[in-house]
Amino acid sequence: MAKQYETVIGLEVHIELATKTKIFCGCSTEFGGAPNSHTCPVCTGMPGSLPVLNKQVVEYAMAIGLATNCKITQVCKFDRKNYFYPDNPQNYQISQLYLPIARDGYVEIETGNGKKKVRIHEMHMEEDAGKLIHDEWDDTSLVDYNRSGVPLVEIVSEPDMRTADEVIAYLEKLRMIVQYLGASDCKLQEGSMRADVNLSVREVGSETFGTRTEMKNLNSFKAIAHAIEGERQRQIELLEEGKEVIQETRRWDDNKEHSYAMRSKEDAQDYRYFPEPDLVPIVISDEWIARVKAAQPELRSEKLERYKKEFDIPEYDAEIITESKKTADLFEAAAAACGKPKKVANWIMVEVFRLMKETGTEPEDLTFSPENLAKLIDLVDAGTINGTVAKKVFEKIFTDNVDPEKYVEEQGLKTVSDEGALKEVVEQVIAANPKAVEDYKGGKEKALGALMGQTMRAMKGKADPGVVNQMLRDMLK
Amino acid sequence: MADMANKISDETIEYVGILAKLELSEEEKEAAKADMEKMLDYIDTLNELDTAGVEPMSHVFPVSNVFREDVVTNGDNREETLANAPLRKEDSFEVPRTIG
Amino acid sequence: MDILKLTALELGKKIKDKEISVREAAEAAIERAKAAEPELNSFVTLDEEGALAQAEEMQRKIDQGEAAGPLAGVPAAIKDNMCIRGQLTTCSSKILSNFRPTFTAEAVENLQRAGAVILGKTNMDEFAMGSTTETSWYGPTRNPHNTAHVPGGSSGGSCAAVAAEESFYALGSDTGGSIRQPSSFCGVVGMKPTYGTVSRYGLIAYGSSLDQIGPITKDVSDCAAVLEAIASHDAKDSTSIAREDYRFTDALVNDVQGLRIGIPRDYLGDGLDGEVQAAVTEAAKVLEKCGAKVEMFDLGLVKYAIPAYYTIAAAEASSNLERFDGVKYGYRTPDYEGLHDMYKRTRSEGFGPEVKRRIMLGSFVLSSGYYDAYYLKALRVKALIKQAFDRAFEKYDVILGPAAPTTAPELGKSLSDPIKMYLGDIYTISVNLAGLPGISIPVGRDGKGLPVGMQLIGNVFQEKTLFRAAYTYECATEKQYEGPAEFGREFGKEARQ
């Protein structure tokens, strides 16, 4: 009989913090820019340069630690992690091993079998590496240190997850918490949130863990799910063949949907950590912790409570809208601008989510302004445009953030409700459809609908349906 | 412990060479082995001291919480960053290909 | 008037009084350096053109009242491990033999603000690893008092330059004695300040928790004046300390009445040269006569300082020197196949034997399985050594002893036995481990005419106590700065015979 296997997964999640400057120097963390244009002696490891810690990094890290139920390490220190690689300008990374800023926390996730706690082993602060671009033809790589020194926290979970769904739920939960704190935008595509997956398999019922591998280079939820499934299969096959799983780091290739061992005899994984002598300890007082707690932005649960009190919208809508801070922010801003929270919620629940789904857009990547959505709602309410036209206009707002007032004006989309302007069209429709006219006069109310449709089509949807309806009835009396 | 002479194997010298990214000639390796054995014997004299309960001291002074504010102070420094590059391609440092 | 005989403060005064122009002073130093360099090799870079340009600029500032400090216009030399923007900064290593920093070290900027004219960059042991200045890729520096002997190290170039009157003063750096020991060997005054007093920003690191920049001068007054100029609280160096009082020259007072001086018995034991011991004991008597209370005591743990130091310094150095890899600056090997080969060849060709020795040791003591046994053990011993000093400073204001067990050894006699060489640092090293200030002042010569230095060690932040004691000694012995005996046109010739 085939053996049953259980997958055991732990995650190392790297999150780039939303500071304006790097962790140890005054260079901008702005994304993009010409290679090496956001660099200085400190973040390029120039001889004689020294790091000075960005206070905001500590505060963001504390906030994330507190929001994930961790204990803050009140005397914490930085250590050096030594390894040679060109994206690492000093050939050591300033990180934390012995006294990380937060430990022993958890987050709660929803699973198929109800709520589950995923424990957090520790969370530490560290600097990001630069970027390597590989030249296909030259057999060389190019080094850009713009990302070097961008602050990261690494959140290390316990091996508490068993399925890809749980992993995704955990990541989504972390992302939501961190976004709510404003500590990071957590964009997987741009690499501001990255996950390394530690995975092992064991026979169901076994008390001990199997040998685990670590998978890197996972930059979408899809890649993570595929990598987990692929690695689980690979390990089970090895065990079934009587072979051993080797503890190693593997690199996921998303195009080939396959992972490769990153071993090399030149990479002894011996990081020779020791306390960073160029930085002094961080002593975190109870008062400081209290200050960070007090300064924390509203978290999701608090937001939900407030929505219930403040806005007359369905609880289900409130839950969906607050799942991402970005959509919640959009909702609140648009509601404030037009004063119609119920209608705003409706637009977000229907049109915004429809277009996000169709275009594969993540909430973080929404670019339209809440003011434009508010204006659109006002235009509908004022009868300036009708519902069908509004949906079309919103598509333009969604993609190009057009100003709906200008757009409607320029495109001539205003509803025509002037009887004089409509009369000619209605007369033509009546003249061209004697059968329908006869049916209506004969008592078939339905026939009026067909005439309505014809008129609206002739008006390219811009006519006021109420006015058209009344005119038809009057003219067919 | 102090009277136990340290023996450094070829493998250890090889391994430390990988960590330190140093390639030693056979002659240098032998010298490094002898040097390291002597130094470690010497360092082992520290074991004569009872340090139980003594906190390792990395910083001499109890200075803590030295921070900078999160304010951008640096502009586009790429010319200076690249000024000493042994090999430069446009605005990047050029190195031998890092992955296959 | 022989300009070269003047101390930095004397020269500064004459420049201020318009008796000597800045250019005259710079030219005098450069001429002397040009004559002496073929024999001494104190400088890696002697920047004649730059120095004369600075002299013009400084004269203008002095004339317009923009530079009025006591050191304005006085030429100085800088150890070649401190960055100066645009100027070759090599650490006397092949691996940095083409490196021009894009910024200037804070200590050097402070000095420039005080009106210094920088003559050039001085030779040193490669990456400050050594006690003789023989490990320099640019060849050894020789002792001006006898060119068959080393100047000490690692700040040997700076000390030799001051001793030979090539510069009026210099900056050095001290990780385990690298200012005090060569100052002793060269007959000049050198101080390692309390850790954190002078910014390390722009100092190319050897052992970050131990490194300090300090002055090397002809006398104690200059030493206090230069420290006053370079010390500052620097926001760019997280380990920099805001001192309450930077007015070190206020301590130049001829009075040690009631000063409690302790001489560690452990400093006068095995390995101490008889002539050195005699000269230092004599100097202690001078201070006693001036009213200080001098007694012997047991400091303890002295012999453990060296193994603890070499563990910590080598570990930090192995990490600090990882950045030299042929990617961003410095030397890159011309021939390589692939990344790791490039790293290995660049570093193996770029570093000298002593540097490689310490990198190997440092990488080993930090490696998996050895960290606790070696590195943490050394940090615990460091804590014990600090405690021993704390106890001593409950009883004494100053600890007095030799700066080194011997006078300067002959060239070529030290590098073959590293441990023996490391033992030469026995009196200076624990001062770095405990972060204390220490000063070396000349107190006589041995039978061969080589200088002997006395070291005074103070409690943390007590530089002023050291200056007071050292100044009182100078006054009592009516010591005037004296250049090397055979210094002259036939420079060094006699010594080599």
Image: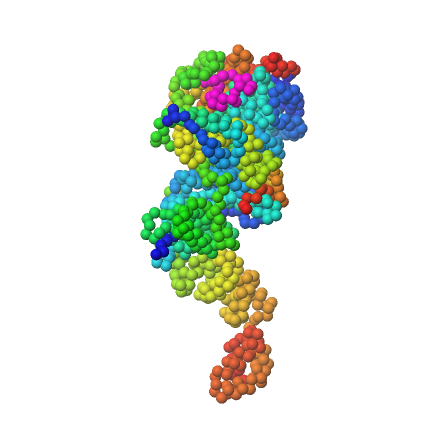
Residue C245: x and y in percent read 48, 28
User: Could you tell me which residue is drawn at 55 percent across and 62 percent down?
Assistant: A399
Relative to A195, is A453 above or below? below
Q: Can the viewer see residue B66?
A: no
Q: Which residue occupies the foreground of this view, A393 or C485?
A: C485
User: Could you tell me which residue is drawn at 43 percent across and 28 percent down?
Assistant: B7
Residue C486: x and y in percent read 61, 13
User: Could you tell me which residue is drawn at 58 percent across and 66 percent down?
Assistant: A407
Q: Which residues are magenta?
A: C401-425
Residue C334: x and y in percent read 61, 36
Query: In which quadrant will I find the C terminus of chain C?
Result: top right
Query: In which quadrant will I find the N terminus of chain C?
Result: top right
Q: Quadrant of residue C304?
A: top left
Q: Can the viewer see residue C303?
A: yes
Q: Which residue occupies the foreground of this view, C249 or C391?
A: C391
Residue A83: x and y in percent read 49, 39
Relative to C489, is A468 above or below? below
User: Could you tell me which residue is drawn at 49 percent across and 12 percent down?
Assistant: C275
Judged left or right of residue B72, residue C300 is: left
Dominant SS type (magenta)? loop
Judged left or right of residue C182, residue C371 is: left
Q: Within the magenta stretch, is there residue C407?
A: yes
Total numbered badges shown on the rendered structure: 0
Relative to B46, is C444 above or below? above
